[in-house]
Image: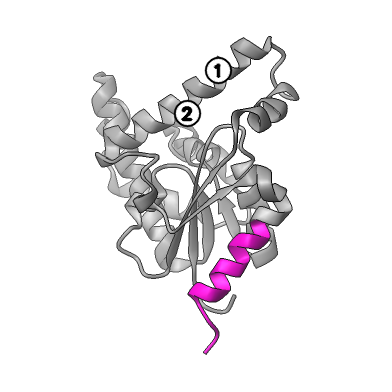
């Protein structure tokens, strides 16, 4: 797309949301930034040693440069707080600043990190929530985790609970509130490719060519 657009993706665990985000970014020719990448650029030692800049996931994207600029504006003490709650709050503020700067300068897909709430005031942002029935998620999870089905279901639910808790702690909102998203899709109905195509169709309606 010629017009700059940022797509934020929140997703239930093992729904395939990250794969959808990466495929969507590939089709649009833009970068996809996920929670693991934000974790890497939030590591105090790694940022000081510049190791992150050479990570294959981050190399050739804007993330490291933006993170470095943002990091320079945050006092070192913020990343060494003994109070864990304060440290987590500082990390969230740091990552939020990175997300805002990325959204300001480029089209991209951002998966997780409460990005829909952080960028809720931007007209060029489309917020998406991806979900799937438990049986679909169990099938996906079983190829990664080797554990009994009842334990696997408990694990999936616990990850979702952590994401909901994280969202509520830092935004005050409900992660599953449909009013927080423009688009909500069941990945099991369309598959990874089909879900990506559905989002593409929505983008064309949302941002018609002039």
Range covered by the magenta-colored residues:
196-210
Q: Is residue 195 left or right of residue 108?
A: right
Label 1 secondary element: helix
Image point (34%, 50%), residue name: 117
Image point (64%, 66%), residue name: 28
Image point (36%, 44%), residue name: 177
Report how far apart the C-alphas of labels 1 and 2 lie in the structure: 9 Å
Residue 6 percent location from the top left of the image: 48, 63
Question: What is the chief secondary structure element of the magenta stretch?
Answer: helix
Dividing the image into 4 quarters, which one contains the N terminus?
A: bottom right
In the picture, the disc for residue 155 is 1
Residue 193 percent location from the top left of the image: 73, 54
In the picture, the disc for residue 160 is 2
Where is residue 204, by image quadrant?
A: bottom right
Q: Is residue 135 left or right of residue 181?
A: right
Where is residue 15, by image quadrant?
A: top right
């Amino acid at each position: 797309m010629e017009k700059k657009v940022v797509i934020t993706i929140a997703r239930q665990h093992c729904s395939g949301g990250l794969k959808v985000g990466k495929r969507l970014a590939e089709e649009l020719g833009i970068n996809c930034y996920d929670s693991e990448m934000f974790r890497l650029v939030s590591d105090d030692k790694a940022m000081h040693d510049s190791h992150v800049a050479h990570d294959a996931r981050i190399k050739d994207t804007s993330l490291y440069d933006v993170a470095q600029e943002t990091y320079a504006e945050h006092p070192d003490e913020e990343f060494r707080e003994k109070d864990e709650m304060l440290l987590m709050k500082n990390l969230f503020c740091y990552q939020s600043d990175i997300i805002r700067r990325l959204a300001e300068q480029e089209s991209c897909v951002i998966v997780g990190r409460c990005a829909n709430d952080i960028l809720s005031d931007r007209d060029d942002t489309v917020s998406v929530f991806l979900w799937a029935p438990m049986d679909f998620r169990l099938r996906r999870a079983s190829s990664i985790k080797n554990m009994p089905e009842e334990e696997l279901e408990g694990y999936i639910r616990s990850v979702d609970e952590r994401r909901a808790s994280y969202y509520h702690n830092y935004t005050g909102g409900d992660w599953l509130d449909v009013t927080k998203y423009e688009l909500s899709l069941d990945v099991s109905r369309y598959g990874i490719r089909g879900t990506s195509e559905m989002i593409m169709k929505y983008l064309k309606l949302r941002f018609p060519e002039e």
